[in-house]
Image (cartoon, helix red, strand yellow):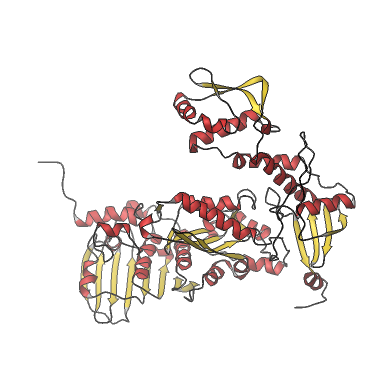
Amino acid sequence: MGHIRQLSENLANKIAAGEVVERPASVIKELTENSIDAKAKSITILVEQGGTSKMCVIDDGIGMNRADALLCFSRHATSKIVDENDLFNITTLGFRGEAIPSIASISVFTLETNNGEENTKVEYEFGKRKNVSSVAMNRGTKITVERIFQNVPARLKYMKSINAEFAAIYSYVERLALAHPEISFTLIHDHKTIFKTNGRNNLLEVISEIYGIPVAKNMIHVDFGNEEFHVAGYISKIDTSRSSKNHIVTLVNHRYVKNMKTINTINEVYRRYLADKRYPIAVLEIDVDPYLVDVNVHPAKLEVRFSKETELKELLLKGLEEALSKKNLTYKPSTRETEKASFKPSLAQMTIPLDEVFEEVKEEPVIETVHEEMPVYEPEKVEIKESPKEEPLKPIKEKIKVIGQTRGTYILGENERGFYIIDQHAAQERINYEYFLNKFSHPDLSIQPMIIPLTFEYPESECLVIDEHKGLLEEVGIHLESFGRHSYIVRGLPLWMKNIDEKIFIDEMIQEVLNNQSVDIVAMQEHAIATLACKASVKGNTYLTTQDMQTIIDNLMRCDNPYVCPHGRPTIIFYSDYELEKLFKRVVV
């Protein structure tokens, strides 16, 4: 007798459930996406005890006839795929035909449906059909799932707390609502309505429902594209950030997905605006020809793969940077009431440690900004070891007149629009940073011999890669000379590498070659440049002349990004005349 045997249908479904159904949130995901595919305009999700005891999804979609209601419990039975060509042109959320039989194999499962002509009720208990009958109901579908994983103890023991399981459900429903603002979603937990959207197809209203009105007011609308991709949605201004990447939501053809290359590209744009480990809020819908995206690379369809990822990255970098550059992002202080209103955590967000939650309340007031274009920066001469060439200064579009200084740290200024407070150290950090960045982006490749050469050692397998791409390093003035089987020696350095720890920096460039087969000097130097700019800047508690203060302000107003220092702290705070009058109770509205 042979050792290979055919698995039973029920056992095969349980194995499939292990891939498709990880936790109660997976059930809600699969069933709700089926409702969306069924053209529902209203979807209600009822959950008890975080989904561990009962879940129910009710929609007003097209429903099913009795034959389809019975057939949908068979594996790989789907209305969305006909032949292999359809795999490369998928426009629905579900398509494998695994969800319903998989969920039914590990739960008590009840399907009630009405297609307008025929109604059906099908009941399953842990993979076995128990009853088929008729039911009185409106057009649509209602699916109830109870006692999940009760017949799979090994999976049941990995269930988390009720709050943790419901938080995962809540988080996914929020993302579905962002992907489909045209659908009304209602989430009810233990008989209490927790989350509800109106289905008016207004994405900003959904963002407001999730994050609160002040955050929604502080979002920037974006809309750009090329022949392959169209990107639209909202990104936060630089004074609204979070401590996690989880608030960067990427949607592809109305499907919520996690595409880390896209998320990292968004963060790359914000890197020059935000402090370390701070991330924007973003909701971006990427429309693309289905033939250019593969959604069949993950069992739960949470990941996608683009055939033109480089083109998409370039489009995002250009489009998002342009959107931010058009906004005046000067910080404006808000009242304590506004700060409290700006923070609206959902239960899903409460999975963040409490110290981070309260940190966001303290550090992240939502601040309105002034919409006026700022000038491009052209730096003045700054004292370093090597004197730069004198370059003409561009005109200042927003002139701020110095009126004083306080605490030897803050410059006070004014113009016809209102009152300004400038952090002199942060401002000069930004000025110096952009000056050094410009210098290093056009490096002097003249070589200066070293008295003591630098030596680098790597495994022979890595040396093979380094040898193949040594030309990339030579383009930026780094000449590696082989020195035995595992070593290289550097006998001279380009002049642009002054004021930098050369050995560490060259090793970082070599690692960049090994990992990415490329060298981006400017990106790698950002931290070094920020440190250099800080050391070269005037410190706090330093009293300056009026002329020195005016020079700092004027040069700040010429910067590409005058709003924050290289570390993400604000350089300038603005009070309008109205805000000053309100502070002194001259106005009450």
Q: Quadrant of residue 320?
A: bottom right
Q: Is 136 rendered above or below residue 77?
A: below
- Which of these two is toward me, 239 or 378? 378
Residue under the image location 77 percent in, 33 percent down? 385
- Image quarter of the N terminus: top left
Residue under the image location 80 percent in, 39 percent down? 383
Query: What is the residue that sits farthest to the left in this orientation?
Result: 1
Query: What is the residue that sits farthest to the front in this orientation?
Result: 392
Q: Quadrant of residue 492?
A: top right
Query: What is the residue that sits farthest to the right in this orientation?
Result: 545
Q: Is 481 rendered above or below residue 143?
A: above
- Which of these two is toward me, 172 or 55? 172
- Which of these two is toward me, 176 or 554? 554
Q: Is 283 rendered above or below residue 532?
A: below
- Image quarter of the C terminus: bottom right
Q: Position of residue 260 (x, y in %)?
A: 47, 50
Q: Position of residue 262 (x, y in %)?
A: 49, 53
The answer to whether residue 357 is seen in the rendering is no
Q: Position of residue 428 (x, y in %)?
A: 77, 48
- Residue 196 vs residue 211: left or right? left
